[in-house]
Amino acid sequence: MTRGRDGGTGAPPTKHRALLAAIVTLIVAISAAIYAGVSADDGTRNRTPLAGGPAPRGDAAPASTGTWVGAWSASPAAAEPRTETTGMAGRSVRNVVHAGVGGTSARITLSNLYGQSPLTITHASIALSAGPGTAAALADTMRRLTFGGSPQVVIPAGGQVMSDIARLPVPYGADVLVTTYSPVPSGPVTYHPHAQQISYLADGELTADVTGVAYTSETRYWRYLAALDVLSNEADGTVVALGDSITDGAGSETGANNRWTDVLAERLHEAAADGRDTPRYSIVNQGISGNRILTSRAGRPADNPSALSRFERDVLGRTNVKAVVIALGVNDILNSPELADREGILEGLRAMVDQAHGRGLKVVGATITPFGGYGGYTKARETMRQEINEEIRSGRVFDAVVDFDKALRDPYDPRRMRSDYDSGDHLHPGDKGYERMGEVFDLDDLKGAAPVQL
């Protein structure tokens, strides 16, 4: 792995580069203004819900000690189509999520980022799943969630809220059920469409139901839920993986938790359990399929927001962040009509690194994986990929580099992914490819921190 980062590329300054730098700076400034006031949680306190009202009292907090870390997360990606009028009114939404670290207590974050009106949640619950492929819960784990001491919370359009602490032991690797109910229409539903996980819907208020019998509708979406934190003795901080569909897990088996971040979480867990001299971190996945560094899609707020515009919320706003992994760029290349964005892509990556360094966070960057044979492949785009990867490997972009390109490429045709790592579309890895990505990551690259830039 390549280490070290300096500030320049060695190329002479040009008007084009100066304009790109100005555009990137403007994007970052707008992003910071939009998400002003949202800061990383260092695990020592509860944040006041953005919905307003008193701060969580923590009445249910256990006496045990530990550190608050992220056990799971998913970036709000878009407004769910055909929910503009009624939202999920009158339905219980049971999200199934996988805990990447264990803890003695839990809390969740709900998002109404894409809502056009306040979202009223009258009931919410958390429980451990009774097993794979079911909406049933282990009966003795069902807990009602509260927000500032109340079972009801109103989340304003564009806002989010963190629950009070629930006294619920969450083992590493457990599937967790988080269920919400809203009785009134709320407008567009904030969702994450490519969950690679089956969740469930039921008619009526059934948030505390443990049988799961009424949850007859299966869904591949996560709705409203943005994060699950746990009070952990297994980890001292959180690593945030920011990426696109290859981080989101497209091409992996649904419900199997075979994303590269899942593999890395398992390695971190095993290293901590064995007492090895590696960072005691959890990892949370902030991948959005189709995500680009520089460009968002249409909408207000934008569907599939650019990585630059969401960095403050989806990375710096996560709980007790210690390091960042950035795996982005392929969609910028594939959607570059005139192949003029090479410097823009690198400027965008450096801008995110600078934001992370402003919080003292170390950044590991990934090379862009091969896509020869994919529908959007051209020789010019391959040249751009190689040039960007060369700059990443040089050490002039990130603090450390994980070479996903080298890990996945066919040694006999480096433009393509090795066939046994390929999901079949020549862009996304399959389960074996994701396993390989998680295995080549050097855990020692997560050690240390970047100096805070004043």
Image (cartoon, rainbow, N blue to C red):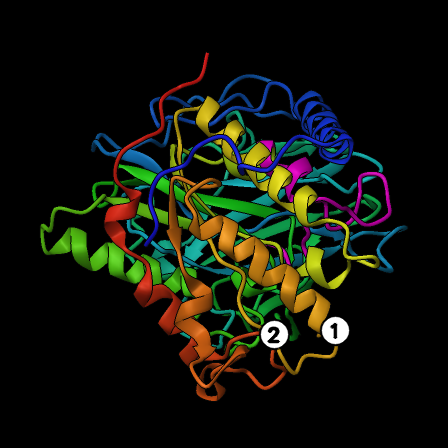
Residue 134 in the image: state x and y as whole percent.
Answer: 49, 74
Against 193, is 87 above or below? Answer: above
Q: Which disc, if any, is residue 376? A: 1
| Residue drawn at x 77%, y 46% as measured from the top left | 296
Who's the residue at 60% across and 58% down the image? 244
Tell me if residue 291 is in the magenta stretch: yes
414 left or right of 276 in image = right
Stretch of the chain drawn in magenta: 286-312
Compared to 344, does 221 lie above or below? below
Q: Between marks 2 and 1, how big is the CA–CA gap? A: 8 Å
**Is 374 in front, or is 17?**
17
- Residue 180 percent coordinates (x, y): 61, 50
Question: Which secondary structure is most common in the magenta stretch?
Answer: loop
Residue identified by numbered label 2: 371
**Hey, which quadrant is residue 269 in on the image?**
bottom left
Q: Amino acid at mark 1?
A: Gly
Viewer can see residue 103: no
Q: Residue, x 64% and y 65% (percent of image)?
A: 383
